[in-house]
Amino acid sequence: MKNKLFLTLLIAVFFNTTLSFSQNISDYLILQDISSYKISKPEKLIPGFQLIGGPRTYDSHGIIGATGHFPYHSDKNYTVMYLGETDDLPSPTVQVTQHAGSDSDRWLLHEVEDIFRSNKSLGALVSGTEIREINSNKIYNWISYAWISGNVLVYITWTPNPAVQNPEPLEVVQAYLQKFPSTIPTTLVLDRAHNEQWIKDEMERRLWLGDKWFAQLQVGDVELTKVLRQSVDHMNVFLDYREKYYGIASTPEKRSLWEYLQAKDDTSIRNKLADYKSWWNTNKAGAINIP
């Protein structure tokens, strides 16, 4: 009798949670078939999650996690797959991220574009990347599609089948553009001037991230070791960019940062960050060497 009562309560909790969660997830995902693309079974839905106080891992931020997106706020991330009705149709996966809304909003479009840039080549656009216009909406495209709608990020991926002539899953893209119209500026063009500005913005963002991590010490919510490691990582990226685009050797500075990090010398690391910010304020308006 006790076991049956426990099972009944467990089922009740499960269904109440599922109902509540479904109402929430439908704000972000289209939970029905889209033309010839059939929504995957409910158990295939990968729920987004929101932790009070903010996610504690970069994975919480979906695709923009790999950009170094600052993690200490409560983004929501939801993912769903649609199955092509026939074998010659692709099966697109849609990821919708609701940014929490904070001072890091200023970097959201920049971080979306980072998806289409090469980390190994220090910010170079992946060959074939373009800005497309679909139903008067600007989107990034290179096999995948991405755009922002305010502080919501939509990212759609699909894998072409080499055995058949796969069409693009445009019906899915159009459906999500209707739900989340793109707010990418209509004036955005991936030309040399924009490329130079993106590179400079990435250098500034890395220094900003260094500051953001040190600010966490004031909150008292993170260990010193993690703050120092994360801040040094971002400074190292800044130094790599400075070496490539401004011709200033990064090795001596990286060696010093590594020594300070091993000694947990936060004062010296802070001083280095201040030095780089001062250098940047003096030199960021200058021309850079783009290969």
Image: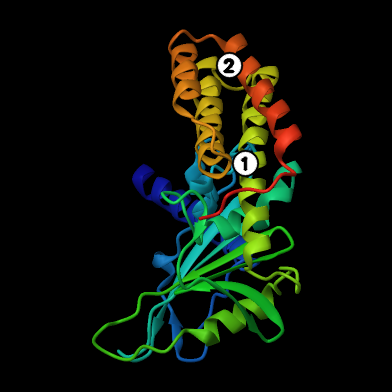
- The residue that mark 1 highlights is 203
Find out whether the residues at labels 2 and 1 contact each other: C-beta distance under 8 Å: no
Q: Secondary structure at mark 1?
A: helix
In screen coordinates, is 145 left or right of 75?
Answer: left
The amino acid beneath tag 2 is Ile
Q: Judge by depth and name the residue closer to the eye, 32 or 73.
A: 73
Q: Which x, y percent locates residue 283?
A: 71, 37
Q: Which mark is residue 176?
A: none
The amino acid beneath tag 1 is Met
Q: Which x, y percent locates residue 136?
A: 72, 84
- Give the image quarter of residue 219: top right
Q: Secondary structure at mark 2?
A: helix
Counting residues from the N terminus, which is met first, the one under dot 2 or under dot 1?
1
- In the depicted structure, whether residue 147 falls above or below residue 53: below
Q: Which x, y percent locates residue 8?
A: 44, 53
In screen coordinates, is 192 left or right of 1?
Answer: right
What's the residue at 61%, 82% (across, down)? 175
What's the residue at 61%, 68% (across, down)? 26
Q: Residue furthest left?
A: 163
- Give the image quarter of residue 213: top right
* Colouring: rainbow
Q: Which mark is residue 269?
A: 2
Is residue 37 visible to the viewer in this orientation of the structure? yes
In screen coordinates, is 278 left or right of 227?
Answer: right
Query: Gap in Å between the C-alphas at discs 2 and 1?
Result: 17 Å
Is residue 53 visible to the viewer in this orientation of the structure? no
What's the residue at 75%, 74% (across, down)? 186
Label 2 environment density (alpha carbons within 10 Å; few <14, some 14–19, many ≥20): many
In screen coordinates, is 16 left or right of 27?
Answer: left
- In the depicted structure, whether residue 217 falls above or below residue 91: above
Q: Judge by depth and name the residue closer to the eye, 38 or 233.
A: 233
Q: Which x, y percent locates residue 6?
A: 41, 45
